[in-house]
Amino acid sequence: FQSQTLWALIVGSILAFVLGFGMGANDVANAFGTSVGSRAVTIIQAYILASIFETLGAVLVGYSVTDTMRKSVVDTSIYNDTPKELMYGQVATLGGCAAWLIIATVFSLPVSTSHSIVGATLGFTLVCHGFEGVVWKKIIQIVISWFLSPILSGSIASILYILTDHLVLRRKNPLEMGLLLLPIFYFFCLAINCFMILYDGSPLLHFNELSWWVCTLISIGIGAIGAAVIQFLVKPRLSARLSQSPTVESLEDKAAWDDTEVGGIKADTEEQKDEKPTVWALLKNILPDRSRVEDQKVLQLFITLQLFTACYAGFAHGANDVSNAIAPLTALVALYRGDFDQAEGTPIYVLLFGVLAICVGLWVLGHKVIRTVGTHMASVTPASGFCIEFGAAMTGLIASKLGLPISTTHCLVGAVVAVGSIKSGGGVNWSIFRNVALSWVVTLPAAGLMSAGIMALLKWLALP
């Protein structure tokens, strides 16, 4: 068996590297796209941070993450009597998924690696066994997630941005309010992110053994420590540095600030003052004033918050999505070694191989998708970027606890468009979003068709 399938292991390993390359250039680039777009970091700094936190997430937490996505889409027990066919199917999956990711990246389209894997898995099994073994419930859930992911993440990010606007950005003294609330922002950001990692977390680190209330207490404690550090160590230095230069950079900016009331609405005429409140007037009062010029000194307060959330997103991506992406290679190795039930977890060397490919892809082609998400689709500032990344991360947490197969890519793009719409109106490039949304719908069938074509060729060439 091994002598007959060695070529499949070698070809599969090469295709797995190409898939990891495409994933690094596309999926990983999403996590830091808004940080680059808001100029919180340079693109090189984003590459370095993404490489570090993707690796840490994959090795520390993703070590024992199983390929549940692949197994939940197709019942692999139908291949118990034909392990060679399943092995060739993994080669087809890797080839179809890798080809689609590279194509999408060349055209700067952020697509879902997880959905590509699902489509490619579906493609090869349709060639081998038709619709037998296909778990249609999971397919329907994925289709629903195309709409659910961006709507949910966009809603959370928008609500957070509106709160930030009311509490800080639209105030007459935004810098003072920002400094006052900074420890509170850090408390919630640290506590929620820690809870995300701890609750139902890594079996390798025994996080899955912790009850919800223990996770809650630990998260609150870490959040409180972080808030205390910000309040007593960071804030005094930050306040002194920001107060050395004027808060508003130009006379035009100052005029814009003077004309903007706390409510965010200008009262230019007596007629406007006498108007009865309407739904539109109420919405104008709730939503940010699109004509306001935001204070650059205030926005600097959100840079480290945004970076922290982006680093967490990279860590979480490395922990979850990397294992899903290299699942076909894991299956290839297991089948080659005679573990036809695939009972063992993901070997550490396979994870490191996948992370290496991902980092190479990120450094070579990552700039294309980073620019689409961070700069071309909508205008992003550190304040809005923090809300966008936090909204996407929260959506991922909620969905994972509910068992919904959503895409981090869809979450982030949905948050970018939602916050961009309420922040700047015409600032969203709807033609780019249209192309991205179409690529989401095409991802599953495109990867499936490519995988099916490869599997049909392999059956004709290699299988009896």
Image (cartoon, grey):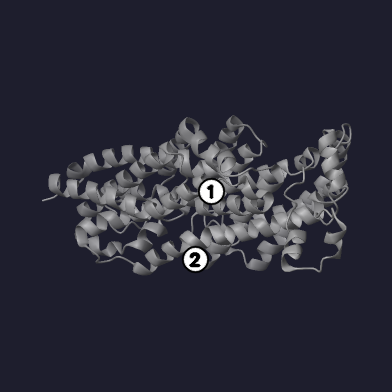
Q: Can you name the residue that lies furthest to the front here?
A: 271
Q: Earlier in the sequence, mark 1 or mark 2?
A: 2
| Foreground of the two, 448 or 307 | 448
Counting the numbered discs, the total is 2
List the single residue furthest toward the left: 464
Q: Which residue is mark 2?
A: 403
Q: Residue at x 18, y 42 (%)?
A: 3
Q: Say which residue label 1 marks.
A: 430
In the image, what residue occupies the spot 72% across and 68% down? 279
Image height of 424 relative to 103, above or below: below
Specify the quadrant of the image occupied by residue 392.
bottom right
Judged left or right of residue 399, residue 223 is right
Circle 2 SS class: loop
Q: Nearer the viewer, mark 1 or mark 2?
A: 1
> SS class of the residue under badge 1?
helix
> What is the crowding at mark 1: few (fewer than 14 residues within 10 Å), some, or many (at least 20)?
few
Specify whether 373 is left or right of 254.
left
Q: Nearer the viewer, residue 283 or 315?
A: 283
Who's the residue at 18% across and 46% down the image? 457
Circle 2 crowding by C-alpha within 10 Å: few under 14, some 14–19, many from 20: few
Question: Can you tell which mark lies on residue 422?
Answer: none
Looking at the picture, how far across and down is residue 211, in whole percent?
A: 62, 67
Q: Amino acid at mark 1?
A: Trp
Q: Nearer the viewer, residue 296 or 244?
A: 296
Residue 62 visible to an observer of this rendering: yes
Residue type marked 2: Gly
Residue 223 locus on image (x, y percent) = 74, 54
User: Quick check: can you spot residue 198?
Assistant: no
Front residue (pair 127, 83): 127
